[in-house]
């Protein structure tokens, strides 16, 4: 039976009113209901008699409301005061600022009160306990007698359903569903100590004891992870088993550090002519890329490297490998600012190289790099597009506008996406195909994805498991660690501005990042303009203070940045437009105002704008933190400089929703599983997924239906087509 097609109105006790309540919880089908997992349980054994409890005990008591009143305290807070008893003893229950409790709990109501027992003026009480209204006869209810626990469902009270009613609906849904088919073979289940699926669903909703609940959860989390991992494994396999890529003629020996003089190919010329010697990490990653590019299996690789680790140079060298074989390259950046900067770096690094001109025998021509940005005039744009289609523009740099229909290539060989986290998972998945379709080449271009957002290993496996991964784990030599200070109190700010002044006087530059304004880009720009005026006429009077925000035209942005780069402007007041990639090695101070408004990954990115050159750098984060979570973030930033360690903190603070992106947020999103806490199960699921993928299509077929709900129909079509 397809549980996703059985409407909840078919359940016995679900009339129009309850249907509406369930709908508010986002529950439409039987499958929704049985995957609406309890938040926690009150075990029968743990349900206490009031007389057994001591002050300070946390407990759940089943009690009846004997009296109730509502009033305001002298401080003006709403207070609902109940007296409840379990037949033997009575206590007071107080609710502050929950005046609706008066209507919810009239005299005579029976409910489970879950909280800590305290004492006030000699009377025992609970303050703001969690409440679950009990309807009907509890202990005599024949259904529930089999289960040792009452499941508490989050949000049910909000829509006017008691956990009790929810449990009743779920019970009926489970019984209607009967024995669910389990795609996991018995032997594997036993090997991995996992419950059978039907038992797991019963166990999570009606556990006899906590062990059952935890075993049930284990199986269901495993299933969530397996679906995700199987998807990843199938994507990867489809790519691996296709020899549809381009075998670039890569001169592996030219990668080595000790190359002889003489007749050296393009790659050797580039590496030897470049002012920097590759770091050991860069060398290793480049070798991994070279091996991929030389193979006829399409490259699909993620390069992770902390901010400032030198990813641009890697990308440039990869482009050189593509050029050496007569292919074209495309570089996609998340913002126009970054596209302009990358364009500048490529022009600078590639201008010394000469390509063999195919048209004219024996003649050579310089590498042609083009920028396709909003700033490019229509006429130039047409010229660039024609050049790409003819094959005499070698590399094009741009934003996601490169994905546009009209951009066509003659021989596209390599696509690089910089700072991938800014692009959705979605875009990455479709890019390869676009690349192929946009090219006269009937082979898949190689794909290199670069990110500075470090992704903890387990999470990366889940989300980027379809990409091979390389990591740059060292910074170029001569870098100093960035000193980070969280200045909580406004009184400390004078010192910060004094530091900015001192650095500027020593010939360096500073960024000031304005508070994030959520309403609109326009509001944010307005606040940046005001902040610049405030600083230029106040704390930073006398310094040349520039401005960079998202409402400026591309030309204005580029101008501000280039004046900052040259030193004409020494302080750049900016919004998060500078978040990624901007590379000005002389900038040594960054001040982030109202820092709590930024996410941890963003703060780390912002901090990475300094410390990119030979001088010691400083990062100041300003403002107090209004929540404990925000304080933890700023504290972590101050304490940790390693992006990977910060990413772990971030993941544990925020959960994985942000990593998974839109695509995986469907009905079968991770409801129970947690990529950090359940890391061990995730790894098990990875092994299982590999095994399922290995056993061939018939076994996958059983999972296919489950996976389909995770992805777009056209991708399902693509993956499950043999
Ligand atoms: P990111 O990895 O954040 O994109 P970039 O590629 O912008 O970092 O590099 C950061 C800075 O380090 C740049 O100024 C770049 O020129 C410099 N750099 C890159 N590789 C090396 C190297 N091997 N030796 C010295 N400096 C390097
Ligand atoms: Mg970069």
Image (cartoon, helix red, strand yellow):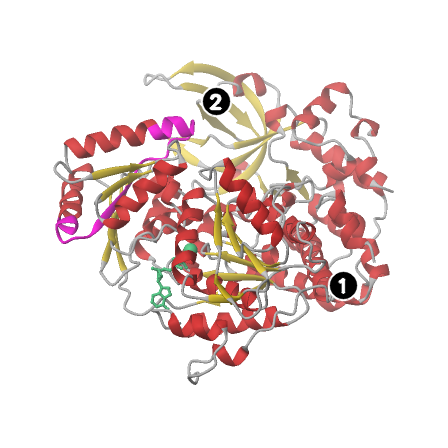
Q: Residue at x 46, y 57 (%)?
A: 454
541 to the left or right of 80: left
Whether residue 202 appears in this view of the structure is: no
Q: Residue at x 33, y 47 (%)?
A: 634
Q: Nearer the viewer, residue 716 or 144?
A: 716
The tally of labels here is: 2
Whether residue 289 appears in this view of the structure is: yes
* Dot 1 crowding, Cα within 10 Å, few <14, some 14–19, many 20+: some
- Label 2 to label 1, Cα distance in Å? 53 Å
| Mark 2 residue's CB less than 8 Å from ligand 1 | no
Whether residue 710 is situated above or below residue 268 in the rendered picture: above
Q: Is residue 519 magenta?
A: yes
Whether residue 107 is situated above or below residue 572 in the rendered picture: above
- The residue pinned by badge 1 equals 693
Q: Position of residue 402 (x, y in %)?
A: 56, 45
Image quadrant assignment for residue 382: top right
Q: Is residue 636 magenta?
A: no
Residue range highlighted in magenta? 502-525
Q: Quadrant of the C terminus?
A: bottom right
Q: Which quadrant of the render holds ligand 2?
A: bottom left
Q: Position of residue 152 (x, y in %)?
A: 62, 37
Q: Nearer the viewer, mark 2 or mark 1?
A: 1
Element class at badge 2? loop
Q: Position of residue 619 (x, y in %)?
A: 26, 50
Image quadrant assignment for residue 4: top right
Q: Position of residue 384 (x, y in %)?
A: 53, 46
Whether residue 318 is situated above or below residue 398 in the rendered picture: below
Of pointers 2 and 1, the one earlier in the residue sequence? 2
Q: Residue at x 37, y 51 (%)?
A: 604
- The residue pinned by badge 2 equals 98
Q: Nearer the viewer, residue 283 or 658?
A: 283
């Amino acid at each position: 039976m397809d549980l996703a097609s059985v409407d909840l109105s078919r359940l016995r006790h679900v009339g129009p009113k309850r249907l509406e309540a369930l709908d508010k919880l986002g529950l439409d089908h039987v499958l929704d209901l049985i995957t609406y997992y309890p938040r926690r349980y009150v075990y029968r054994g743990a349900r206490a008699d009031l007389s057994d409890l001591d002050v300070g005990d946390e407990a759940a008591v089943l009690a009846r409301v004997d009296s109730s009143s509502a009033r305001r305290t002298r401080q003006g807070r709403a207070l609902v005061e109940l007296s409840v008893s379990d037949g033997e003893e009575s206590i007071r229950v107080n609710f502050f600022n929950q005046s609706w409790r008066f209507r919810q709990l009239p005299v005579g109501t029976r409910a489970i009160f879950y909280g800590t027992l305290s004492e006030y003026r000699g009377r025992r009480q609970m303050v703001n306990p969690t409440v679950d209204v009990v309807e009907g006869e509890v202990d005599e209810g024949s259904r529930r007698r089999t289960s040792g626990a009452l499941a508490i469902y989050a949000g049910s009270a909000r829509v006017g359903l008691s956990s009790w009613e929810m449990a009743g609906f779920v019970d009926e849904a489970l019984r209607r569903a009967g024995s669910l088919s389990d795609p996991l073979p018995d032997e594997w289940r036993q090997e991995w100590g996992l419950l059978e699926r039907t038992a797991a669903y019963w166990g999570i909703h009606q556990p006899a004891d906590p062990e059952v609940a935890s075993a049930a959860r284990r199986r269901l989390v495993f299933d969530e992870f397996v679906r995700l991992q199987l998807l990843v494994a199938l994507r990867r396999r489809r790519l691996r088993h296709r020899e549809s890529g381009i075998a670039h003629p890569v001169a592996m020996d030219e990668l080595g550090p000790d190359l002889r003089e003489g007749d050296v190919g393009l790659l050797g010329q580039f590496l030897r002519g470049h002012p920097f010697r590759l770091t050991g990490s860069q060398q290793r990653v480049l070798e991994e890329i070279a091996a991929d590019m030389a193979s006829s299996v399409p490259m699909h690789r993620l390069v992770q490297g902390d901010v400032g680790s030198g990813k641009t140079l890697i990308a440039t060298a990869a482009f050189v490998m593509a050029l050496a074989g007569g292919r074209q390259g495309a570089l996609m950046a998340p913002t126009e600012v970054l596209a302009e900067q990358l364009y500048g770096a490529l022009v600078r690094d590639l201008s010394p190289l000469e390509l063999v001109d195919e048209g004219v025998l024996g003649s050579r021509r310089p590498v042609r790099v083009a920028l396709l940005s909003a700033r490019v005039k229509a006429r130039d744009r047409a010229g660039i597009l024609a050049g790409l289609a003819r094959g005499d523009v070698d590399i094009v740099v741009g934003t996601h506008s490169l994905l546009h229909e009209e951009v066509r290539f003659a021989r596209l060989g390599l696509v690089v996406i910089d700072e991938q986290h800014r692009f959705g998972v979605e875009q990455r998945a479709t890019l390869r195909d676009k690349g192929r379709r946009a090219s006269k080449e009937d082979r898949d271009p190689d794909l290199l994805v670069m990110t500075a957002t470090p992704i903890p290993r387990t999470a990366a496996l889940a989300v980027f498991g379809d990409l091979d991964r390389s990591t740059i784990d060292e910074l170029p030599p001569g870098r100093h660690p960035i000193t980070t200070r969280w200045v909580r109190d406004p009184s400390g700010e004078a010192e910060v501005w004094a530091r900015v002044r001192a650095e500027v006087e020593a010939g360096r530059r500073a960024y000031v990042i304005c508070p994030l304004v959520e309403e609109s880009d326009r509001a944010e720009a307005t606040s940046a303009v005001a902040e610049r005026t405030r600083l230029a006429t106040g704390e930073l009077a006398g310094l040349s203070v520039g401005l960079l925000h998202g409402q400026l035209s591309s030309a204005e942005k580029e101008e501000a940045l280039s004046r900052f780069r040259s030193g004409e402007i020494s302080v750049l007041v900016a919004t998060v437009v500078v978040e990624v990639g901007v590379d000005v090695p002389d900038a040594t101070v960054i001040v982030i105002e109202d820092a709590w408004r930024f996410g941890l990954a963003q703060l780390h990115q912002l901090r990475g704008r300094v410390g990119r050159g030979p001088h010691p750098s400083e990062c100041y984060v300003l403002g107090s933190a209004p929540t404990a979570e925000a304080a933890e973030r700023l504290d972590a930033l101050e304490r940790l400089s390693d992006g990977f360690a910060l990413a772990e903190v971030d993941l544990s603070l925020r959960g994985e929703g942000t990593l998974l992106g839109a695509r995986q947020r469907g009905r079968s999103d991770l409801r129970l599983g947690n990529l950090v806490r359940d890391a061990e199960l995730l790894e098990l699921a990875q092994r299982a997924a590999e095994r399922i993928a290995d056993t061939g299509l018939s076994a996958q077929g059983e999972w296919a239906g489950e996976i389909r709900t995770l992805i777009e129909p056209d991708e399902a079509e693509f993956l499950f087509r043999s």
